């Protein structure tokens, strides 16, 4: 399978080829070329040549093209959802179809946001002058995206880039690049200028070359914190939108609806097999409701069907790759060695086609010195930690440098507002789990946690991908 450069498929000139392996059965789904430095140069050149034509399109013309791209995605939902399930390992019926539908909706949202993008008219001290602001594209964007949402995350960044008038080059994860390639082809089919979107496939070194390229003016990155640091170092002074990891706490107070809290905790652990930046990474529970909640979580976790992603009854598929599975092994072993109690799971599931199927795991009596508390596990595990007061709950929740989303379950409005004020997190949810999000609100990490800059979501991504310019006109 070839690269997409300047609107055309062509072989990559990298020295290696990649086999895309299905996590569910270890079968080779596709063999893809890899990009070379020369391919990066060609894609960046094509993007810069497309930039003027894309900028000249009116906001309404861009909106029409974005809707056409959404239409192209919608017509391919069936086969593309199956391809996404095969390359990522996520359940087809429970998750992959929704990801395709949501990706199309992201393009429609960007179309409507750019149609009504507002700027300001400002007063001047001189009555003969008129002052107003307007927005211009930043330039060519490199979009470096992960495997856990192989179409949705590229769509979030690409739709906003194109709405803003920026050409983009996608470097998807080598573990699941096929969905991003299909997305780019739908965009090309919609009628955007050739070069408005390219896809370069390969390993992380190609992402580094792309981020550092002088012909690239902005970076959109979603992935791990370590990789984010390397991307930022390579990008230098370029504009960046970075979302890098989460360790989301779900706090359950003594006045919480325990049914809702248990349901949210379990969903946040099995959605995408826990391989999600807003997964239930830490469940903080008040002493007085601890035993009841753990029992409910255990019962709900036992009802989650682990199996073949293409089976309609499956709610949780395999982990995507051995790196994630090995981290699950290590975090569970570390917790148990340090005195945590295994409630259920804790191992790779036997009698499955590969050893990437991992049991939905619940670990109780987790303390702050354990890896499963301190770091993002990125797998199907619910670590439970007790607290005895509000102050302790907020202290535990903030004991992380990965403040992406936090969740609070309480019936007290005062406590909810205190949580909004005190939690160092990009988003605070009340009576909803950490894995909840919508496409139009701003999404990203808290500024003091090191999880990112900029925001993903609706008009906020478009604003981050444009330059605010001021015009002052003397009318005499």
Image (spheres, rainbow, N blue to C red):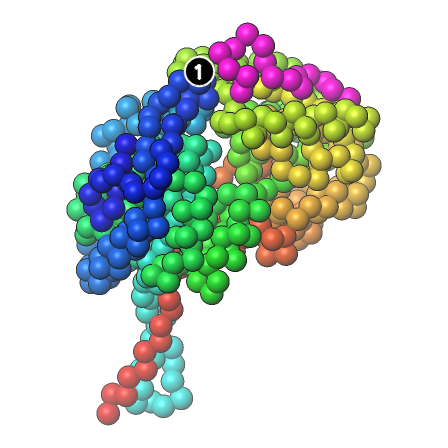
Q: Is residue 308 at least partly visible in the picture?
A: yes
Q: Is residue 344 magenta?
A: yes
Q: Position of residue 113 (x, y in %)?
A: 33, 52
Residue positioned most to the front:
15
Image quadrant where residue 46 sits: bottom left
Q: Residue shown at 60%/17% (left/top)?
A: 348
Main SS of residues in magenta: loop
Q: From this view, report whether residue 296 is shown above or below residue 285.
A: above
Neighbours of disc 1 within 10 Å: few (<14), some (14-19), many (20+):
some
Q: From this view, report whether residue 324 is shown above or below residue 249.
A: above
Q: Quadrant of the N terminus?
A: top left
Q: Nearer the viewer, residue 31 or 388?
A: 31
Q: From this view, report whether residue 340 is shown above or below residue 394.
A: above
Q: Position of residue 190 (x, y in %)?
A: 19, 43
Residue 296 left/right relative to 117: right
Q: Position of residue 48 (x, y in %)?
A: 26, 60
> Pointer 1: what residue?
25
Q: Position of residue 377 (x, y in %)?
A: 62, 33
Image quadrant where residue 295 sits: top right
- Over which residues does the magenta segment extend? 341-357
Instruction: Check disc 1 and report its element: helix, strand or loop.
Output: loop
Q: What count of labels does the image hold?
A: 1
Q: Residue shown at 22%/40% (left/top)?
A: 10
Q: Quadrant of the C terminus?
A: bottom left
Q: Is residue 295 magenta?
A: no
Q: Residue shown at 34%/46% (left/top)?
A: 36
Q: Is residue 102 at least partly visible in the picture?
A: no
Q: Nearer the viewer, residue 214 or 196?
A: 214
């Amino acid at each position: 399978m070839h690269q997409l450069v300047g609107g055309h498929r062509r072989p990559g000139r990298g020295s290696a080829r990649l086999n895309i392996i299905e996590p569910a059965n270890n079968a080779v789904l596709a063999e893809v070329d890899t990009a070379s430095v020369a391919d990066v140069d060609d894609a960046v050149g094509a993007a810069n040549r497309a930039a003027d034509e894309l900028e000249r399109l009116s906001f309404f013309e861009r909106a029409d093209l974005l809707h056409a791209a959404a239409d192209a995605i919608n017509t391919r939902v069936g086969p593309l959802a199956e391809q996404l399930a095969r390359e990522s390992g996520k359940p087809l019926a429970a998750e992959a179809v929704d990801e395709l539908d949501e990706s199309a909706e992201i393009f429609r949202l960007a179309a409507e946001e750019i149609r009504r993008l507002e700027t300001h008219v400002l007063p001047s001290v001189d009555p003969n002058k008129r002052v107003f602001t307007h927005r211009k594209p930043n330039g060519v964007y490199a979009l470096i995206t992960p495997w856990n949402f192989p179409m949705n995350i590229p769509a979030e960044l690409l739709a906003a880039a194109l709405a803003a008038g920026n050409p983009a080059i996608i470097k998807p994860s080598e573990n699941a690049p096929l969905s991003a390639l299909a997305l780019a082809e739908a965009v090309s089919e919609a009628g955007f200028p050739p070069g408005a979107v390219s896809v370069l496939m390969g390993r992380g070194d190609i992402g580094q070359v792309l981020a550092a390229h002088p012909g690239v003016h902005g970076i959109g990155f979603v992935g791990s914190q370590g990789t984010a640091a390397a991307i930022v170092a390579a990008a230098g002074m370029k504009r960046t939108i970075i979302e890098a990891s989460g360790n989301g706490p779900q706090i359950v107070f003594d006045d919480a609806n325990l049914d809702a809290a248990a349901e949210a905790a379990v969903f946040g652990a099995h959605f995408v097999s826990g391989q999600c930046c807003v997964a239930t990474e830490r469940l903080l529970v008040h002493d007085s409701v601890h035993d009841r909640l753990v029992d409910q979580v255990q019962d709900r976790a036992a009802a989650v069907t682990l199996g073949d992603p293409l089976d309609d009854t499956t709610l949780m598929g395999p982990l995507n790759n051995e790196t994630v599975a090995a981290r699950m092994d290590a975090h569970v072993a570390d917790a148990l060695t340090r005195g945590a109690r295994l409630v259920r799971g804790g191992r790779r599931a036997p009698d499955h086609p590969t050893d990437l199927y991992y049991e939905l795991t619940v670990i109780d009596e987790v303390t702050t010195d354990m890896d499963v508390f301190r770091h993002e596990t990125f797998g199907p595990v619910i670590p439970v930690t007790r607290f005895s007061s509000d102050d302790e709950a907020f202290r535990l929740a903030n004991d992380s440098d990965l403040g992406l989303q936090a969740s609070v379950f309480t019936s007290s409005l005062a406590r909810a507002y205190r949580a909004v004020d005190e939690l160092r997190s990009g988003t605070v949810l009340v009576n909803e789990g950490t894995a909840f999000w919508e496409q139009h609100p701003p999404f990203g990490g808290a500024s003091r946690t090191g999880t990112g800059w900029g925001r993903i979501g609706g008009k906020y991504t478009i604003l981050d991908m444009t330059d605010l310019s001021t015009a002052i006109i003397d009318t005499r």
